Amino acid sequence: MGPPTDAPTGRTGPVDRQTLRLLETHLIDDPLVESTSIDPDPYEPRLLHASLDTGRYPESVETVRIDIQWFTSGDFSFHYLETESAGQHWECRWDRHPNEHNTRLHFHMPPTGTNVRDIPDLAEHPLEVYSTVLTAIDERIETLWSEGE
């Protein structure tokens, strides 16, 4: 799973550069975030990447990142991906975009992101979505540590 491929730009609208930069500003200040980058570059942003601090995770987790897309229509994707030392992935995704599998606002459930459920109560403001996602990541980290005990 990756950023949504079933959300063609023509249906979601152009990339919202201002919102991607706003989200990057908040990610840079978040203690969980190690670094950010923008593809293809800061002048033409399409995708915001945030690498998370693996020091907060159990040793089995090698890399963690969030990939974010935001469009002027208000459609978005927050894709969370953990890679373990054994090469296994744990991922999920919060989306709002036109699709054929669920309502516009939906969640691709972990561990593979294959199963999808509607999420009718997710806020629409970018910083509220950001807060929801980061809260879920904090809960995931707590779960990983409690499972290891």
Image: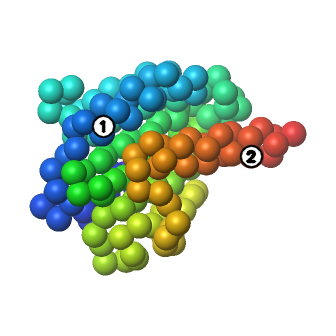
Tell me the amino acid under the disc marked 1. Leu
Residue occupying image coordinates x 54% and y 62%: 109
Q: Residue at label 2?
A: 143
Distance CA(mark 2)–CA(mark 1):
29 Å
Q: Residue at label 1?
A: 20
Q: Is residue 100 left or right of residue 8?
A: right
Tell me the mark number nearer the camera, choosing from 2 and 1: 1
Residue occupying image coordinates x 22% and y 37%: 17
Q: What mark, if any, has residue 146 been given in the picture? A: none
Query: Which structural element holds mark 1?
Result: helix
User: Depth check: 48 or 123 in front?
Assistant: 123
Tell me the amino acid under the disc marked 2. Thr
Q: Is residue 125 left or right of residue 149?
A: left
Rate crowding at label 2 as few (under 14), some (14 to 19) or many (20 or more) other CA atoms within 10 Å.
few
- Give the image location of residue 15, x and y in percent: 20, 46
- Give the image location of residue 99, x and y in percent: 30, 72
Q: Is residue 10 visible?
A: yes
Q: Earlier in the sequence, mark 2 or mark 1?
A: 1
Q: Is residue 59 left or right of residue 41?
A: right
User: Depth check: 87 or 143 in front?
Assistant: 143
Rate crowding at label 1 as few (under 14), some (14 to 19) or many (20 or more) other CA atoms within 10 Å.
many
The vertical placement of 121 against 41, above or below, is below
Q: Are marks 2 and 1 in contact (CB under 8 Å)?
A: no
Q: Quadrant of the N terminus?
A: bottom left
